[in-house]
Amino acid sequence: METIFLLEDDAALSRGIAMALSGPDRAVTQADTVAGARETLTRAGFDLLILDVNLPDGSGLELLRALRQEGDRTP
């Protein structure tokens, strides 16, 4: 099963994206803050990361930079 991680703080948009991407062979895990994303990403690996740029507690780009520095190469 493919796993996708979605970081999006707009609840309606997040639900829509997750609904569009979910399927019988694909699961979507969601978070709405950088802190929540960090917690989730330390517990599980994913096949794809979709990150919002402007979040209340930071930026998806900053999170991605940190992940890359830690050696995570998830697309």
Image (cartoon, helix red, strand yellow):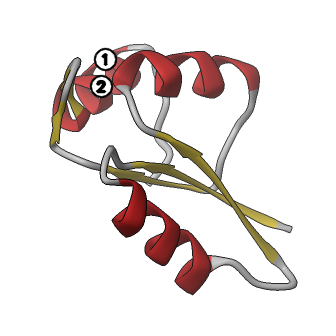
In this rendering, the answer to whether 19 lies above or below 69 is below
Query: Which is more foreground, mark 1 or mark 2?
Result: 2
Q: Residue at x 23, y 18 (%)?
A: 57
Instruction: Tally the numbered discs.
Output: 2
Residue 75 x %, y %: 43, 55
User: Quarter holding the N terminus?
Assistant: bottom right
Q: Identify the residue at the far front of this view.
A: 12
Badge 2 crowding class, 10 Å Cα cut-off, few under 14, some 14 to 19, many 20 or more, is some
Front-lying residue, 47 or 60: 60
Q: Name the residue that disc number 1 marks.
A: 66
For label 2, the SS is helix
**Disc 1 residue type (three-letter):** Ala
Q: Residue at x 36, y 23 (%)?
A: 34
For label 1, the SS is helix
Residue 73 x %, y %: 46, 39
Q: Identify the residue at the far left of this view.
A: 54
- Is residue 59 shown left or right of residue 36? left
Q: Are marks 1 and 2 in contact (CB under 8 Å)?
A: yes
**Disc 2 residue type (three-letter):** Leu
> Where, by quadrant of the figure, is residue 14 drawn?
bottom left
Q: Name the residue that disc number 2 marks.
A: 63
